[in-house]
Image (cartoon, helix red, strand yellow):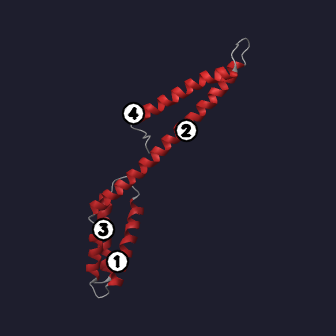
């Protein structure tokens, strides 16, 4: 069997995988990566057993990889997991930024209240009261997000 026929078998396999890949994935990149993997595995098998039929070796490589549907499911699981990790990082970042902004507002409000004429409120007393309210608000937000399942504090 010629290299052209082997290339056609690989191309058919990659088309089958491409048809079952979930929409929205970078299918071309994944298919290129899969093609490189197939080629490397095939070349390795040919080097180990040069007398064997190249078609049989290619079929062995493709059988080792699995059915196109199995490959697509694995790509889907991997992609979803990576997407969930990115979303988690974004949520934590937003919580941290919100906390920092909250603390800046508390300090600024404490300074403003303590400098009002005839207020009679010290900066530290105002800071303490507003800090308690600010922290309370932040902890409620974290609790709400955890209850909604959008963050996991054990990660």
Quarter containing the C terminus = top left
Mark in the foreground, 1 or 4 = 4
Residue ID for mark 3:
65
Q: CA distance from mark 1 to mark 4?
A: 50 Å
Q: Earlier in the sequence, mark 4 or mark 3?
A: 3
Horizontal side of residue 60 vs 154, given as left or right: left
Residue ID for mark 4:
147
Q: CA distance from mark 3 to mark 1?
A: 11 Å
Q: Are marks 2 and 1 in contact (CB under 8 Å)?
A: no
Mark in the foreground, 4 or 3 = 4
Q: Nearer the viewer, residue 23 or 56?
A: 56
On the question of residue 24 being in view, the answer is no
Packing grade of label 3 (10 A; few <14, some 14-19, many >=20) is some
Location of residue 38 with respect to 29 vertically, above or below: below
Residue ID for mark 1:
42
Q: CA distance from mark 4 to mark 3?
A: 40 Å
């Amino acid at each position: 069997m010629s290299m052209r026929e082997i290339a056609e078998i690989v191309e058919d396999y990659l088309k089958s995988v491409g048809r079952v890949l979930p929409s929205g994935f970078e299918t071309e990149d994944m298919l290129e990566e899969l093609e490189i993997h197939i080629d490397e595995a095939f070349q390795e098998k040919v080097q180990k057993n040069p007398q064997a039929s190249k078609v049989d070796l290619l079929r062995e490589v493709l059988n080792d990889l699995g059915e196109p549907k199995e490959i697509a499911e694995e790509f889907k699981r991997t992609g979803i997991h990576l997407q969930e990790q990115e979303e988690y990082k974004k949520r934590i970042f937003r919580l941290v930024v919100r906390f920092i902004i909250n603390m800046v507002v508390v300090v600024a409000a404490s300074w403003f209240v303590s400098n009002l004429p005839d207020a009679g409120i010290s900066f530290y007393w105002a800071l303490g009261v507003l800090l308690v309210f600010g922290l309370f608000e932040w902890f409620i937000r974290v609790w709400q997000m955890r209850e909604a399942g959008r963050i996991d504090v054990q990660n």
